[in-house]
Amino acid sequence: MRHATAEEAAGGSDSARRLSEQGRREAREAAQAIRDRGARPAIVFTSPRLRARETAEIVAKALGISVEVREGLNCGATTEAYLDVLRPDEARDVLLVAHNPEISAIAGALAGKGVAFRPSTVCCVDLSEASAHLDWIRHPGD
């Protein structure tokens, strides 16, 4: 999942950008969409940036699961960093909340096709030892 819509930087630090009211609404709607599609993540791993943490907290609260901050999901993260976050949890479903263009790139690489993420886009990629495929993608407003 890409973090929901954030406020503009307005001279402050990019890492401290908060969700806008629209972003908080998008995060709640994304949580509902995850539930409606029958996805049951066991935990949410999130980038340490505030907008991602706020998105993760809203979604996790709605789903009744916990959140863990993972530095490996920060802006500029590599595919290997994403995989390092996922590897210890191969036996359970997890939700990642991170940033573009990295989240689009990793989802596309895993799914074997281009995947575009707007703020609050969420997708489900089914990973196995031998393959990965895109089960579904949901953009805000879908």
Image (tube, grey):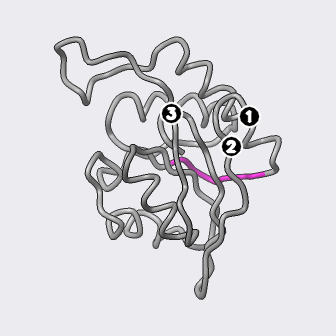
Which quadrant of the structure image shows residue 84?
bottom left
Residues at marks 3 and 2 touching, judged by CB atoms closer than 8 Å: no
Q: Which mark is residue 119?
A: 3
**In-front residue for pair 87/51:** 51
Q: In this rendering, would 12 be left or right of 77?
A: left
Determine whether label 3 and label 1 are within 8 Å by CB: no
- 116 over 83 or under it: above or below: above
Kindly identify which residue carries mark 1.
142
Mark 2 to mark 1: distance in Å? 6 Å
Say what amino acid the circle numbered 3 marks: Pro
Q: What stretch is highlighted in magenta?
A: 39-44
**Of the residues shown, which amino acid type is indicated by label 1?**
Asp
Label 3 vs 2, first from the N-terminus: 3
| CA distance for labels 3 and 2 | 11 Å
Residue 93 on image: x %, y %: 64, 61
Give the prevailing secondary structure in the magenta stretch.
Answer: loop
Secondary structure of the residue carrying tag 3 is loop
Q: Mark 2 points at which residue?
A: 138
Does residue 142 appear to the left or right of 105 in the view shown?
Answer: right
Q: What residue type is labelled 2?
A: Arg
**Circles 2, 1 touching at the beta carbon (< 8 Å):** yes
Q: Does the magenta stretch include residue 40?
A: yes
- Badge 3 density bin: few <14, some 14–19, many ≥20, Cα 10 Å: some
Left or right relative to 57: residue 137: right
Distance of label 3 from label 1 (alpha carbons): 13 Å
Along the line of sight, the residue nearer the viewer: 118 or 128: 118
